[in-house]
């Protein structure tokens, strides 16, 4: 007996007029054939209410990850591969947030610290940043000079003696030996996906070590570039290759997806970014979208609302959490998707459905 299973994965949003028209035509044709379908594979359970009017058997498969590909390309932060074997970390592949030679750590703090609370900033609508002065790091044969120019034009030249020093990055943030806390977003930089709200939330933070790095492209690029121009802690890298994206995700302090829960289409979509982020073994914060199954709740942080003030509060909370706790959350989420969302497990879900129809 021939059994027909329809795999229906997503409703697309944010596409052009021609695409949406063709999709509508495609949907009209599909509805006429739904009666001949014996079972459905859906990306969210909410899709069942629209597509499966006859109550046919269905399963939800929100995504599939390749465990083999992961093990070939990824290394979980903390020097542990998925099978649990220790490996040597290649320090040359990681961004360093401090400069140290011969057990000497350079501590430089030239930034003004803003002690106003997030609530104060929201109340006064003060989204100004702490970038009040220009600073440059100048290397010489046997010293590093941190040259700071304040608002009055006066310059302070701080020599740091060390003949071995090497500084290659222009975005080093060192304060009391604390590493830079990088908030990373990768994906489409479209306004409807909440990227501008994320930037507004970042501007409300009171953490001198926090930086926002954005990778991708979309209809908000012009605004993002302007924010990055005005605030050195916001870096916009545009579209980069996938390997670079995966590397930056692994190096992030926290990964963020600001897509709002208020959009109707979120009921019928599961952001693939969720699985990709979790595989980076870093903390992930996002909105609780209706299309995200509850079994992910233990491995994700959720914003309380899409208001920039509330988003800032949650980011601030995560930035001050214990590093070991965040490390554990990241690794646990990574192991969960590796064990439960791989091709073998999800393939078995599909086989079970076929056996039911």
Image: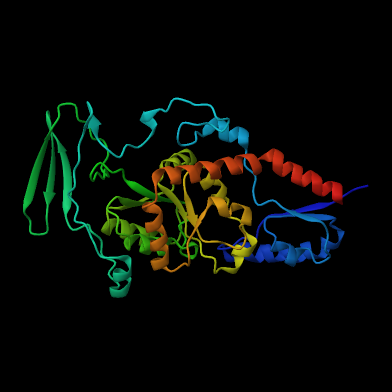
Q: Specify whether residue 240 is in view.
A: no
Would you say 140 lies left or right of 84 here?
A: left
Would you say 298 lies left or right of 345 here?
A: left
Q: x and y percent of residue 171 in the render?
A: 27, 45
Q: x and y percent of residue 155 in the render?
A: 7, 50
Q: Quadrant of residue 89?
A: top left
Residue at the left extreme of this rendering: 154
Q: Quadrant of residue 173?
A: top left
Would you say 301 lies left or right of 66 here?
A: left
Of residue 48 and residue 245, the one placed in the foreground of this image is 48
Of residue 255 and residue 53, the one placed in the foreground of this image is 255
Give the residue drawn at x 85%, y 55%. Answer: 38
Please tell me whether residue 135 is drawn above or below residue 13 in the rendered image: above
Of residue 14 and residue 46, the one placed in the foreground of this image is 46
Please tell me whether residue 246 is drawn above or below residue 117 in the rendered image: above
Q: x and y percent of residue 150 in the render?
A: 11, 55
Would you say 328 lies left or right of 151 here?
A: right
Q: Specify whether residue 10 is in view.
A: yes
Residue at the bottom extreme of this rendering: 123
Give the residue drawn at x 26%, y 43%. Answer: 172
């Amino acid at each position: 007996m021939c059994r027909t299973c329809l795999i229906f994965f997503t409703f697309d949003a944010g596409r052009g007029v021609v695409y949406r028209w063709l999709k509508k035509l495609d949907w009209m044709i599909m509805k006429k054939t739904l009666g001949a379908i014996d079972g459905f594979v859906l990306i969210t359970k909410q899709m069942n209410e629209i597509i499966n009017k006859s109550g046919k058997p269905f399963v939800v498969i929100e995504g599939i990850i390749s465990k083999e590909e992961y093990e070939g390309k990824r290394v979980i932060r903390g020097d542990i591969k998925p099978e649990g074997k220790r490996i040597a970390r290649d320090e040359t592949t990681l961004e360093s947030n401090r400069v140290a030679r011969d057990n000497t750590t350079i501590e430089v703090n030239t930034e003004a610290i803003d002690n106003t609370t997030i609530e104060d900033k929201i109340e006064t609508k003060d989204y100004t940043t702490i970038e009040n002065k220009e600073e440059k790091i100048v290397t010489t044969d046997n010293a590093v000079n941190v040259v700071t120019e304040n608002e009055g034009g006066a310059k302070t030249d701080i020599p740091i003696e060390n003949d071995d020093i090497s500084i290659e990055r222009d975005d080093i943030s060192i304060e009391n030996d604390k590493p830079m806390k990088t908030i990373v977003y990768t994906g489409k930089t479209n306004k409807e996906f909440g990227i501008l709200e994320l930037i507004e939330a970042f501007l409300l933070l009171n953490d001198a070590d926090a930086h926002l790095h954005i990778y991708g492209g979309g209809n908000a690029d012009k605004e993002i570039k302007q924010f990055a121009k005005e605030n050195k802690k916001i870096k916009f890298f545009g579209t980069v290759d996938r390997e670079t994206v995966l590397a930056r995700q692994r190096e992030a302090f926290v990964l963020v997806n600001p897509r709002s829960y208020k959009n109707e289409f979120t009921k019928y979509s599961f952001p693939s970014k969720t699985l990709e982020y979790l595989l980076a073994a870093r903390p992930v914060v996002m909105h609780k979208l209706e299309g995200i199954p509850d079994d992910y709740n233990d491995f994700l942080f959720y914003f309380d609302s899409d208001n920039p003030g509330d988003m800032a509060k949650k980011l601030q909370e995560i930035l001050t959490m214990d590093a070991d706790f965040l490390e554990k959350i990241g690794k646990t989420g990574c192991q969960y998707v590796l064990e439960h969302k791989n091709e073998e497990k999800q393939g078995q879900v599909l086989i079970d459905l076929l056996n039911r129809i």
